[in-house]
Image (tube, rainbow, N blue to C red):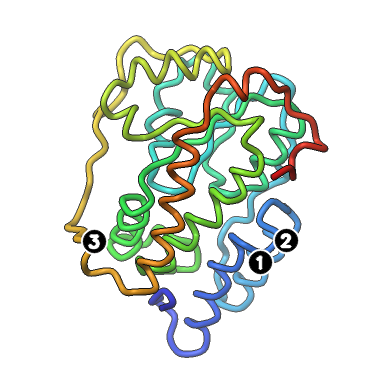
Amino acid sequence: MVASTRGRGLSGFVLSVTICASYWLLPDNYRAYRLVRRAGNALFRRQEDVQGDPALPRDAVVIEGFRHSGNSFLVGNVAAKDAGRVRSHSHRAFALREAVENNVPTVVMIRDPLEAALSLRHRSHSAHVMAWGVQFSAFTALLCWLGYYRSAWKLRRGITFVQMEDMAVDNRATFERVSAATGLTFKGETSFATRHRFDGARPEQELSWASRMVLAEARRLHAAIRAYPDRVRQATQMVPAMATAA
């Protein structure tokens, strides 16, 4: 039930546990994340980049989300004059906490958990793109998805959630919504394909019982996020004390 990796034996097992645990244990703490990254580099004799301090300029806009959830498409279509304001692609909750506590406009992309997890699994097995060479299974990808959005949900009063599926259907409507929430402007024409390209067959019936359990919980959270009304966010200004509110 742990991710297969390019590491073998004990190191592969430790890698799998480390990746999943980092989304659940102090997920919004930058120092804990940095410690995990450095420990992983030492353990696997790699030189993966460790993200710098997440301090944000006053005019910043944060666009984040779990991997394979439309982040690149949205960021890639921000107009050139505003592109320098955008901070994105940490795929970690500490970036959300930093932004929300400092009242920085924050957008979180979200995609159907099964689609996101299986897209990540496919990508991690087909290209050397993941930190430390990790290869995700459906189970570990779903577990990481759930950990990430569980943290984002706690910060929901300071976040505008955007569904990747909605953006695929009408990207212009999505751009207008994000612009209203953040002040960003977008390009007149989209920079690349509107519809996300789903890669690989993903029959849900092939999931293990453990994956199905995690998926059920992930879908409950996804449904809650989809139902979360924008007017609640607009009526409530986020302050640091609210960041951990249930």
Q: Are marks 1 and 2 in contact (CB under 8 Å)?
A: yes
Q: Position of residue 129 (x, y in %)?
A: 40, 58
Residue type at numbered disc 2: Ala
Residue at point 71%, 59% (across, down): 26
| Residue where numbered disc 3 is placed | 204
Q: Which quarter of the image is occupied by the C terminus?
A: top right
As drawn, the label of residue 36 is 1
Give the mark nearer the N terminus: 3 vs 1.
1
Residue at point 49%, 19% (across, down): 178
Residue at point 28%, 69% (across, down): 207
Location of residue 133 (image quadrant): bottom left
Q: Position of residue 116 (x, y in %)?
A: 36, 50
Residue type at numbered disc 3: Glu
| Residue where numbered disc 2 is placed | 32
Q: Which quarter of the image is occupied by the N terminus?
A: bottom left
Is residue 93 visible to us here?
yes
Q: Are marks 3 and 1 in contact (CB under 8 Å)?
A: no
For label 3, the crowd category at 10 Å Cα-Cα, with few meaning under 14, some 14 to 19 and many 20 or more, is few
For label 2, the crowd category at 10 Å Cα-Cα, with few meaning under 14, some 14 to 19 and many 20 or more, is some
Between disc 2 and disc 3, the foreground one is: 3
User: Where 95 sits versus 24, above or below?
Assistant: above
Tell me the element at label 2: helix
Is residue 34 visible to us here?
no
Q: Is residue 50 left or right of residue 180?
A: right
Residue type at numbered disc 1: Val
**Residue sticking out furthest to the top:** 188
Residue at point 35%, 62% (across, down): 124
Give the mark nearer the N terminus: 2 vs 3.
2
